[in-house]
């Protein structure tokens, strides 16, 4: 699928823009990129306009910026402003979900769909997280080798590329061990879609996240951490049906 280029603050970023209809911003997770979500983009773009950026430093957005939540959130805000997108529906996977919650403090977002998302403090160490990621990666690859081996390779390439940078690891810890600001004051309608066999983030984590976000809805679904791209039609149908609620 073709990637577009956009210049923001003298830096060039890549993104996918496909479909016609209601604008949906899909935010990839940590070390992931827009291409990883093609299987989910395709069914959702049949009735909607999908905007899927490569976050700063990831994918084809080779911008060499600091790894900071503020950097990524500001990028998303500027991205929407430059494209004149108002009141988008936002979907965020894992770290992308945490960014969606933070973005709602700056941009009007009527509905947010969190897919196995971060957002509250995790109760495991960084080493445990890396091990869980490795185990999860092996598990996901067995589900769909051709698809998930590519996705996992993107993750590991980013880890190898940036692993020597101190701010990368400082921010990686911040992602896991800090909670989003003002979760109890979020005005967006939030639906948490949770693949219940996620090895990385437990079902109890999902329940705690729901408790923190006022008036949010939690829906458990079949599958594991990347089930939204292994079984995309199930997630696409669920999101489409809830968009009009």
Image: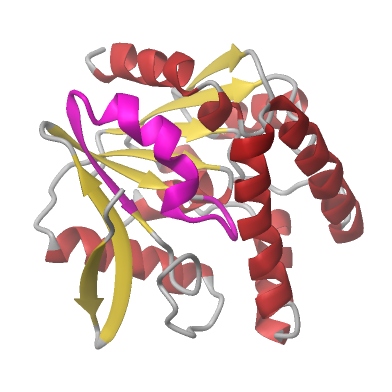
Question: Would you place residue 66 above or below residue 169 in this image?
Answer: below
Q: Residue at left 58%, top 39%? A: 117
Q: Is residue 56 magenta?
A: no
Q: Residue at left 71%, top 69%? A: 159
- Where in the figure is residue 84, as x and y percent of width and height? 9, 57
- Where in the figure is residue 19, as x and y percent of width and height? 17, 36
Q: Nearer the viewer, residue 128 or 218?
A: 128
Residue 36 shown left or right of residue 14 in the figure: right
Quadrant (top left/top right/bottom left/bottom right) for the C terminus: top left
Residue 187 shown left or right of residue 95 in the figure: left
Q: Is residue 43 magenta?
A: yes
Residue 148: quarter of image: top right
Residue 111: quarter of image: top left
Q: Residue at left 53%, top 23%? A: 193
Residue 186 shown left or right of residue 79 in the figure: right
- Where in the figure is residue 66, as x and y percent of width and height? 53, 83
Magenta region, residue range? 29-52
Q: Residue at left 66%, top 82%? A: 167
Q: Nearer the viewer, residue 19 or 97?
A: 19
- Where in the figure is residue 31, as x and y percent of width and height? 59, 60
Question: Would you place residue 156 above or below residue 236 in this image?
Answer: below
Tell me if I can see residue 21 in this picture: yes
Question: Would you place residue 132 above or below residue 143 in this image?
Answer: below
Tell me if I can see residue 123 in this picture: no
């Amino acid at each position: 699928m073709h990637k577009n280029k956009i210049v923001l603050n003298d830096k060039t970023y890549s993104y996918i823009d496909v479909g016609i209809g209601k604008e949906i911003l899909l935010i990839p997770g940590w070390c992931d990129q827009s291409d990883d979500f093609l299987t989910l983009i395709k069914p959702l773009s049949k009735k909607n306009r999908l905007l899927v950026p490569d976050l700063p430093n990831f994918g084809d957005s080779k911008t060499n910026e600091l790894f900071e939540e503020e950097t990524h959130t500001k990028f998303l805000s500027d991205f929407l402003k430059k494209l004149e997108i108002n009141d988008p529906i936002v979907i965020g996977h894992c770290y992308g979900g945490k960014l969606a919650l933070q973005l709602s403090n700056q941009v009007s977002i009527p509905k947010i769909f969190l897919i196995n998302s971060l957002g509250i403090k995790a109760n495991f160490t960084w080493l445990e997280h890396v091990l869980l990621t490795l185990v999860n990666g092996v598990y996901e690859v067995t589900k769909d080798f051709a698809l998930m081996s590519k996705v996992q390779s993107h993750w590991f390439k980013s880890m190898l590329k940036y692993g020597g940078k101190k701010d990368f690891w400082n921010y990686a810890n911040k992602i896991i061990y800090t909670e989003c600001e003002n979760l109890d004051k979020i005005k967006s309608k939030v639906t948490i879609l949770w693949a219940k066999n996620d090895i990385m983030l437990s079902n109890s984590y999902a329940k705690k996240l729901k408790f923190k976000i006022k008036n949010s809805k939690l829906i458990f679904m079949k599958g594991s951490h990347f089930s939204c791209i292994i079984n995309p039609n199930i997630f696409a149908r669920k999101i489409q049906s809830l968009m009009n609620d």
